[in-house]
Amino acid sequence: MIPFLHLGPLTIPTFGLMVASGLLVAAYVLQADFDRRREGFLQSGYLQETKEPSHRDEGFLVIGIAGISGLVGARLYHVLESPRDLMADPSLLISRFGFAWFGGFVGGFIALFFLARHYRIPTLEFMDLCSPAAAVGYAIGRIGCLLSGDGDYGVPTKLPWSMSFPNGVVPTTERVHPTPIYEFLIWMLIAVILWQVGKKTLNGEAAGKIFSYYLILTGIARFLIEFIRINPRSFFGMSNAQTASLASIVLGIVLLLRTKSAALSSAKET
């Protein structure tokens, strides 16, 4: 593995490089979604038209703010999982290693909530808009975990595609499940599904459907992946990530049912 790239006097962590790449690609995906929904947003009065295409950069601004908030949330959640370690060494707050998926989700969600108000777009519609981009950004960021060998790999296995990380940040000479690759493939598939579902919502389906699918699909994916991860167990034999994943799935199901109920009510009224 390659935890760092050395370019002359510069030392670039590959994890940070891939996170930045993930945010950049996510920004392009989000901008594409903004553009395909722009007419509907303009008709609803959410956005103001601009004659300059170069000024249509909402996706990049949103991803920049939400991405930074997500990284802060991911780091805080990770260090707060072990408060004793944090009290013993406060510098852990600014370490380049150790980020929790659920903390990133919460941090990013809070930022998106306020950004939705800034753009005057209803929160659920805004979450629908951002869901495919969020899945893409997470997928690419996981390649950074693979390159750095930061301990996000799985348990030992004899499968032919198993890998070892002798030079990783958290090294292991055993051949283990390359779970970052699994997550990359799964989250990219989820992004494609969400993008396709988004095409239907352009025809006026109730807001919240894409976001509910995001919560359910990513929750299921992370819950299953955790069975072959090396994370410690806490609640009823589950890892913290599995507990958070269950909460995500339940929230997604509730939101989806509410969305379908709203659609049925709207159909009856018409």
Image (spheres, helix red, strand yellow):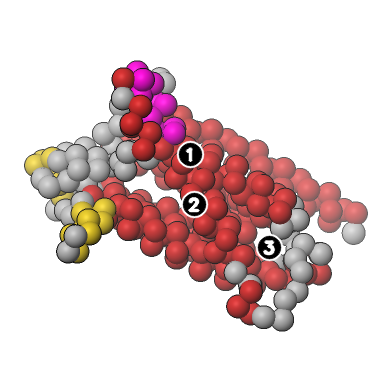
Decide: few, some or many residues near mark 2? Use Cα within 10 Å; few <14, some 14-19, many ≥20.
many
Q: CB atoms at circles 3 and 1 under 8 Å apart?
A: no
**Residue drawn at the location 84% of the way across and 56% of the way down:** 267
As helix, strand or loop, the secondary structure at mark 2 comes to helix
> In the rendered image of this protein, does residue 256 appear above or below residue 230?
below
Label whose residue precedes the other's in the sequence (2 or 3): 2
Residue 78: say if magenta: yes
Q: Which secondary structure is most common in the magenta stretch? A: helix
Residue that label 3 marks: 201
**Magenta highlight range:** 76-87
The amino acid type found where label 2 is placed reads: Gly
Looking at the image, is mark 1 or mark 2 earlier in the sequence? 2
Is residue 174 on the magenta stretch?
no
**Image position, residue 212 (x, y; %):** 61, 47
**Mark sitting on residue 73:** 1
At which x and y percent is residue 182? 31, 52
> Is 268 left, or right, of 234 in this rendering?
right
The image quadrant that residue 188 belongs to is: bottom left
